[in-house]
Image (spheres, rainbow, N blue to C red):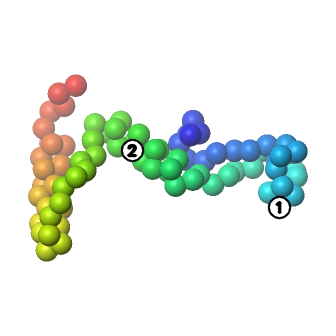
């Protein structure tokens, strides 16, 4: 992942780059893969003190209620003093 977490760069003068990617001899932005985007997203969330919860199985009709409860818990956690 790039240091900025947003974009990778490649040297377009590199012989391994295709002509379609440009041969300007300058650094060109290169789109992040979905994996890199997800890693950056999870890193930003971790920096906010949040952790992903997985493995909750509910009937579809309860999904909206669970999301509302989770939003309420998150709001409550953000108001509480940090335990760091």
Label 2: element kind:
helix
Sooner in the amino-acid sequence: mark 2 or mark 1: 1
Label 1 element class? helix
Label number found at residue 42: 2
User: Crowding at label 1, few (<14), some or many (≥20) Cα neighbours within 10 Å?
Assistant: few
Q: Which residue is nearer to you in this view: 84 or 60?
A: 60
Would you name the residue on which mark 1 appears? 20
Q: Left or right: where does residue 4 sit relative to residue 51?
A: right
Query: At 59% across and 39% down in the image, what residue appears?
Result: 2
Between 34 and 75, the residue placed more toward the observer is 34
Q: Are marks 2 and 1 in contact (CB under 8 Å)?
A: no
User: For the point 14% across and 69% down, which residue is it?
Assistant: 59
Residue 76: percent from left, percent from top:
12, 47
Figure quadrant of residue 9: top right
Residue drawn 50% across and 50% down? 35
The residue nearer to you, when weighing 64 against 16, is 16
Above or below residue 69? Residue 10 is: above
Numbered circle sitting on residue 73? none
Residue 43 occupies quadrant = top left
Spatial separation of the CA atoms under disc 2 and disc 1: 32 Å
x then y, percent, for residue 64: 16, 69
The image quadrant where one finds the C terminus is top left
Q: Does residue 9 appear anywhere in the picture? A: yes
Q: Is residue 68 visible?
A: no
- Considering the image in quadrants, where does the N terminus appear? top right
Residue 17 location (% of width, % of height): 82, 50
């Amino acid at each position: 992942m790039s240091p900025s977490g947003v974009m990778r760069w490649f040297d377009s003068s590199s012989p391994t780059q295709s002509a379609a990617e440009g041969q300007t001899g300058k650094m060109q932005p290169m789109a992040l893969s979905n994996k890199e985007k997800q890693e950056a997203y999870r890193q930003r969330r971790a920096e906010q003190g949040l952790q992903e919860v997985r493995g909750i199985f509910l009937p579809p009709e309860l999904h909206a209620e669970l999301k509302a409860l989770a939003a309420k818990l998150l709001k409550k956690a953000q108001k509480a003093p940090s335990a760091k």
